Amino acid sequence: MSDKQYIYAVARIRAKEMHLLTGGFMEQLIAAKSPGECLQLLLDKGWGDGQVNGVDRFEEILSIERKKTWDLMDELMDDLSPFDVFLYSNDYHNLKAAIKEVCTGTDYEGIFISQGTIEPEVIFKAIEERDYSLLPERMRPVAKEAFDTLLHTRDGQLCDIMVDKAALEAIYEAGYATKNPILSLYGELTVVTADLKTAVRAQRTGKDMAFLKKSLAPCKTLDINALMAAAVDSFDAIIKYLSSTKYADGAEELKKSPSAFERWGDNLIIRAIRPEIHHPFTLGPLAAYVLARENEIKTVRIVLSGKINDMPEDSIRERVREMYV
């Protein structure tokens, strides 16, 4: 895009940022007396399409909001490929779903995600017909390996970690390939937070070094060998390693609770992109807006799910992410 196009695009994004959900609004959602009241607050904010109602259909409203974001990006950008980095996780999710459905013969209705860089039907056909040439080159090796692994071992977890690691590697490489600071940072922090969460879960469930080597993806700002060694040692060893990194504040959150640590990981990305509010004439504000919208959709899902399951307000609040604005 030219500088002139970015001027227009960023001006549109600045106007849209005025309608992003704030921390104050999230407090209103948390304080709502019922899931229905929570949903009405969102509808009053313009969420959904005016036709969807009923708490049991809130996921449909979230899907509508995600579509609004990508329709806007399609309108503002000549080429959406730099944003493929945000969609790879959906592609690899669909790959896992296709492998499991073909291997087990089970119809996982509703498990496929439509928003990706590859149509779910193409991924399913590639697995069903063992025609991996239908997939992007980066996806072919793990598709075959994960399918063969599940077919012969019936180990669903092993299949999952293989595909999840490949997804992280794809996101990481794509982020840096754009040579855009915000997208490179997104790739880096996505791998960092995923590796840390995986290491913590592996330590708690007693996984060995072989499991960790199959699960963790390399990145610039973590020493994954040191992280793996800590994970097979003890929880305290993970805390000690994390405290020695640039992500030391995450160690304090990890001591509090798993949900606090999960929230810290998502907040890390939001805090990193927040300066884009002040950066004009580049791709950065558009990328940051997409991430801000994904963050608020995730947070709304957390609040609504908490309300539906009668969670205490404090428990919901502990899981709520920081807002971009």
Image (cartoon, helix red, strand yellow):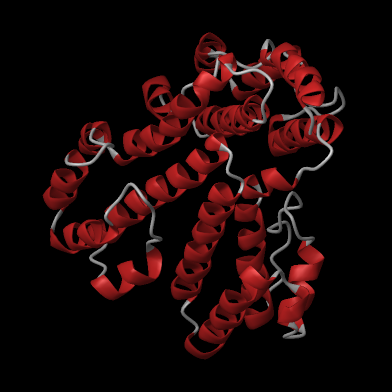
Name the residue located 72 percent from the left edge and 13 percent from the top edge: 45
Horizontally, residue 145 falls left or right of residue 49, namely left
Pick the quarter of the image with the N terminus.
Answer: top right
Coordinates of residue 322 in the picture (x, y in percent): 46, 22
The image quarter containing residue 157 is: bottom left
The image quarter containing residue 193 is: top left
Q: Nearer the viewer, residue 236 or 118?
A: 118
Q: In this view, does 229 lie above or below 241?
A: below
Q: Can residue 53 be seen in this view?
A: yes
Q: Nearer the viewer, residue 281 or 274?
A: 281
Pick the quarter of the image with the C terminus.
Answer: top right
Q: How many marks?
A: 0
Name the residue located 59 percent from the left edge and 78 percent from the top edge: 141
- Farthest front residue in view: 3
Name the residue located 62 percent from the left edge and 74 percent from the top edge: 100
Coordinates of residue 164 in the picture (x, y in percent): 50, 62
Q: Is residue 321 visible?
A: no
Name the residue located 76 percent from the left edge and 18 percent from the top edge: 7
Q: Which of 189 and 19 is in front in this view?
A: 189
- Farthest bottom residue in view: 152
Q: Nearer the viewer, residue 45 or 29?
A: 45
Coordinates of residue 34 in the picture (x, y in percent): 58, 20
Horizontally, residue 4 falls left or right of residue 246, namely right
Coordinates of residue 315 in the picture (x, y in percent): 38, 27
Horizontally, residue 71 falls left or right of residue 22, namely right
